[in-house]
Amino acid sequence: MPTKSSILSFKFLNKKKKIWLSDFLTEYRRVLQAFVDYFWENYDKIKHYKYADSQHYKDVQKITNTYFMSAMLKDCANQGFGIVNGTWKKYKQREWRYNKEVENGKSVEELEYLHKLLILPTKPIIDENVKANCSNVVQILSETTMSTFDFIISLRGTEKRKKTILPVKATSHLRKLLERGTLNRSAMLSEEDVQVSVSIPPLPNDEDGILGIDIGITNVVTASDGQFYSSDADGNSLAKILKKMSNVKGETKAFQRYSTHRKNIINYCINQLDLDGIREVKLEKIKDMRRYKRVSRFQGRWIYPYILQRLKEKCQLLGIKVKFVRCAYSSQQCSKCDFVDKQNRRESRFCCKSCGYEADADLNAAVNLSKR
Ligand SMILES: [Zn+2]
């Protein structure tokens, strides 16, 4: 099942927990290095294994004299095993390619280039940038009693019968992912944050291959199958750039730079949009730009047609039909029960006053478009 990851900050941890986390990670990296050393030395013996096994934990526990218990050692061992295995696998692939090219009778110069890549790998070094990859020892629970935090990351395996609890706040990114999938039992821990992942069931593209797409500013595009894109690879969102642009004068260098960035974000978002299996895309027919007034008239007049143009080009390239449908009430109507009410929409959330259906407002609108 495809997974998506989300990063939650530890900045709200109290001082005591921060110190605990830092001490834990120092020990984890020390033990992880010991596992890497161990698997590196014994690679010929263990290379046919799929996972590390309990004899390995015991050996490393003796060498390191760590206080970690076997549950924690298991995670550490598997991460170390993965690092060593991955390093050799990459080398083997290069070697395989080289031999293949020799067979194919490649020229001496080309082979020389490939041969240069065939340097034997050196033992990986675990530095302070390596995150602890925990799954066996971690539990992620929704927090219902403390209103200020949304999840607790519960870790075992450092002390007998004791769990350490690290509270975190959810982000809107994670909330959106959770509407579509389920949280996995794994966490990549660093001093600053924890990376969690969500398994998302492949979305049944509407049986008839029709996809509604809502165009906006917070989310550049939101599709009725649950895809949404708001920012570029570096996490810069369109909304953020537009806010910056509103603070600089036109015709300045800064404005030009932001304009380029704005285009890049939109293009990136549209590239990300997966239209596999889609035969028709439904977009709203917009008569006026009132919806975009929030960002100033000038921006609205530019952004909507630009996104639309890019979307149309993409569809044309893929042979997908584009249909414009009426947009009246698409943001106020419930996509589950069709009840229409102004009150249904509250900022970025949709909450039906009739059936109680709750969703991201843009997603609800996109589903409505897909049905028109
Ligand atoms: Zn409803």
Image: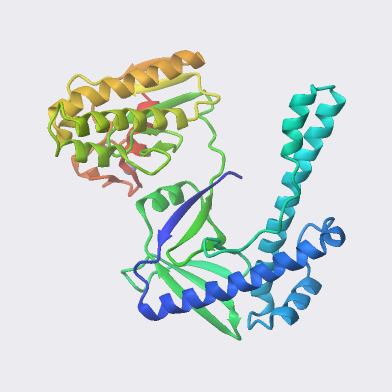
Residue 156 percent coordinates (x, y):
57, 76
Image-quadrant location for residue 323: top left
Image-quadrant location for residue 276: top right
Q: Nearer the viewer, residue 209 or 114?
A: 114
Image-quadrant location for residue 17: bottom left
Q: Nearer the viewer, residue 261 or 140?
A: 261
Find the residue positioned furthest to the bottom: 160
Q: Quadrant of the N terminus?
A: top right
Q: Is residue 150 left or right of residue 47?
A: left
The residue lying at 35 percent from left, 33 percent from top is 265
The residue lying at 23 percent from left, 45 percent from top is 347
- Colouring scheme applied when the structure was drawn: rainbow
126 in relation to 112, above or below: below
Residue 114 percent coordinates (x, y):
74, 33
Residue 100 percent coordinates (x, y):
83, 30
Q: Nearer the viewer, residue 232 or 35?
A: 35
Residue 269 visible, this orientation = yes
The residue lying at 75 percent from left, 82 percent from top is 62
Q: Is residue 32 left or right of residue 132?
A: right
Q: Quadrant of the C terminus?
A: top left
337 in relation to 188, above or below: above
49 in relation to 360, above or below: below
